[in-house]
């Protein structure tokens, strides 16, 4: 099997277009097309259905793409290990976490990491879907539950809680709830219990809904919930890490909160010796320790 033809096939299958693959490979469209035809002839199979909107893999093409994708992941791992064998921390690190945690907690702290390692490239993937670390969909993950995938190194970073918050102007206009039953005269801003989120948050929202709340606004991530609360739309269910940058937010019903939500850092066992992973792990743990110390030193109200 011609490795160069496989490389070109993988680029075409990934892009779904001869033209886009050629741009990636720095080859002309005709050169890419010739290599694909030669590969199809050597295999005796058609790999693509061709139509005006692009290319679609045939069943045989899907089988070959699965194989080349696995090869690409193995090569990425090998390259990462080679790069990590040098003293400097550089290259790409793919980090996945939730939209809320990534945008409201992690992103603002990244300047510290870049100042320390200016040649590091972070690909920050913010989504609720749990990516497959052993399959190298990401290098490292920060998640609000213990990962269940095998062959992962995991580190428990901290616990968070979901609580109720509102702005003072909203409470001045609508009143401060004294009991959970008082929520029936307020709008609740939260994630939908059927959306991807931590189980403790969903349980808390379901409990709150038993108080016959007539008006709600549901948003599929905590960044949206925060913005709605800041704009005075109602009382929001938010993780406590969000409020550190918004000290003017007022906690509502202090005795209502979720169970502890564990936050885990996880990465594949095969990246145990990665200098980039070690640098990121050290950075995260330092940031959490500094936050704990600030909370400890803060004067009690």
Image: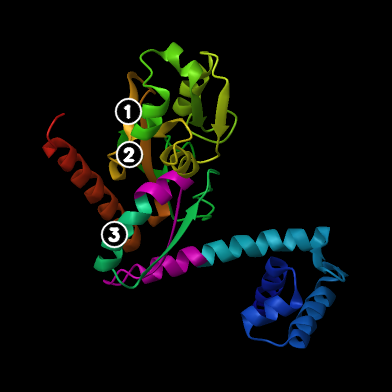
Residue sitting at 32 percent across and 28 percent down?
Answer: 251
Most distant residue in the front direction: 173
Q: Nearer the viewer, residue 141 or 45?
A: 141
Q: Quadrant of the C terminus?
A: top left
Q: Earlier in the sequence, mark 3 or mark 2?
A: 2
Q: Which residues are magenta?
A: 76-105
Residue sitting at 75 percent across and 77 percent down?
Answer: 18
Answer left or right for 121 relative to 219: left
Asked if residue 102 lies in the magenta stretch, the reply is yes
How far, Cα to Cα, is label 3 from label 2?
Answer: 27 Å
Q: Earlier in the sequence, mark 3 or mark 1?
A: 1
* Circle 2/circle 1 CB separation < 8 Å: yes
Q: Which residue is mark 1?
A: 251
Q: Quadrant of the N terminus?
A: bottom right
Q: Position of residue 108 (x, y in %)?
A: 33, 55
* Circle 3/circle 1 CB separation < 8 Å: no
Q: Which residue is mark 2?
A: 243
Answer left or right for 142 relative to 45: left
Vertical order, 36 against 295 (above or below): below
Q: Which residue is mark 3?
A: 279
């Amino acid at each position: 099997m011609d490795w160069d033809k496989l490389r070109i096939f993988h680029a075409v299958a990934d892009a779904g277009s001869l033209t886009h693959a050629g741009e990636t490979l720095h080859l002309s469209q005709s050169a890419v097309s010739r290599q694909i035809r030669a590969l199809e002839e050597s295999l005796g199979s058609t790999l693509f259905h061709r139509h005006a909107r692009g290319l679609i893999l045939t069943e045989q093409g899907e089988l070959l793409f699965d194989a080349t994708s696995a090869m690409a992941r193995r090569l990425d791992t090998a390259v990462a290990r080679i790069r990590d064998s040098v003293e400097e921390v550089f290259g790409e690190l793919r980090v996945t976490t939730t939209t809320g945690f990534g945008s409201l907690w992690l992103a603002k702290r990244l300047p510290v990491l870049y100042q320390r390692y200016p040649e590091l490239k972070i690909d920050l993937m913010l989504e609720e879907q749990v990516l497959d670390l052993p399959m190298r969909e990401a290098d490292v993950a920060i998640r609000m539950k213990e990962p269940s995938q095998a062959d992962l190194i995991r580190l428990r970073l901290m616990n968070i809680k979901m609580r109720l918050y509102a702005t003072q102007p909203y409470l001045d206009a609508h009143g401060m709830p004294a009991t959970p039953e008082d929520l029936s005269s307020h709008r609740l801003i939260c994630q939908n219990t059927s959306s991807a989120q931590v189980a403790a948050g969903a349980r808390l929202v379901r409990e709150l809904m038993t108080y016959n709340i007539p008006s709600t606004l549901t948003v599929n991530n905590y960044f949206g919930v925060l913005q709605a609360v800041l704009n005075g739309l109602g009382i929001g269910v938010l993780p406590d890490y969000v409020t550190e940058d918004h000290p003017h937010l007022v906690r509502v019903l202090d005795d209502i909160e979720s169970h502890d939500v564990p936050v885990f850092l996880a990465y594949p066992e095969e990246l145990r010796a990665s200098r980039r992973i070690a640098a990121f792990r050290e950075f995260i743990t330092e940031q959490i320790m500094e936050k704990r110390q600030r909370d400890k030193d803060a004067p009690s109200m």
